Amino acid sequence: MERKIEKEMKKTKEMIKAFMKYTRLSIRDMQKYFKEGDFANAKIEAEDAVDLLMWISQELEVLARLEKMLKDENR
């Protein structure tokens, strides 16, 4: 069971890293559009970043639960 949890944690961490990269790109693009005065596209990028951050938050919650399961199993 421990290996399965660790494998799932590793997979989730990799997905989070990828989505963090996309979030940074959305924020960078939002800033670029904002500076250019293109508020409609800046809003779209901001919404994309928020959606990604919400997903990341949920996955971090999963990681915290998996980590707790590992600690409880090792006791």
Image: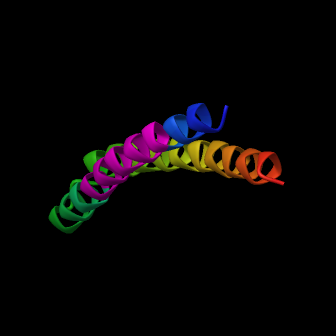
Q: Residue furthest bottom?
A: 35
Q: Quadrant of the N terminus?
A: top right
Q: Nearer the viewer, residue 36 or 71?
A: 71
Prevailing SS of the magenta stretch: helix
Residue 12 belongs to the span the image colors magenta: yes
Taking the spot 65% from the left edge, 42% from the top edge, the residue there is 62
Q: In this rendering, is residue 7 above or below 25?
A: above
- On screen, residue 58 versus residue 11, left or right, reads right
Q: Position of residue 41 (x, y in %)?
A: 26, 46
Q: In the picture provided, is 37 more to the left or to the right than 65?
A: left
Q: Please report the residue visible at 45 percent of the width from the left and 47 percent of the height from the top.
A: 13
Q: Quadrant of residue 5?
A: top right
In the depicted view, which residue is nearer to us: 75 or 34? 75
Which stretch did the figure color magenta?
Answer: 10-26
Q: Give the colour scheme shown.
A: rainbow
Whole-percent x, y for residue 59 in the image = 57, 43
Q: Who's the residue at 29% across and 47% down the image?
A: 22
Viewer-proximal residue among 67 and 27: 67
For residue 62, side relative to residue 14 (left or right): right
Q: Position of residue 9 (x, y in %)?
A: 53, 42
Magenta region includes residue 13:
yes
**Residue at 58% in and 31% down:** 4
Left or right: 71 as drawn, with respect to 41: right
Image coordinates of residue 11 in percent, x first then y, are: 44, 37
Question: Quarter of the image holding residue 29?
Answer: bottom left
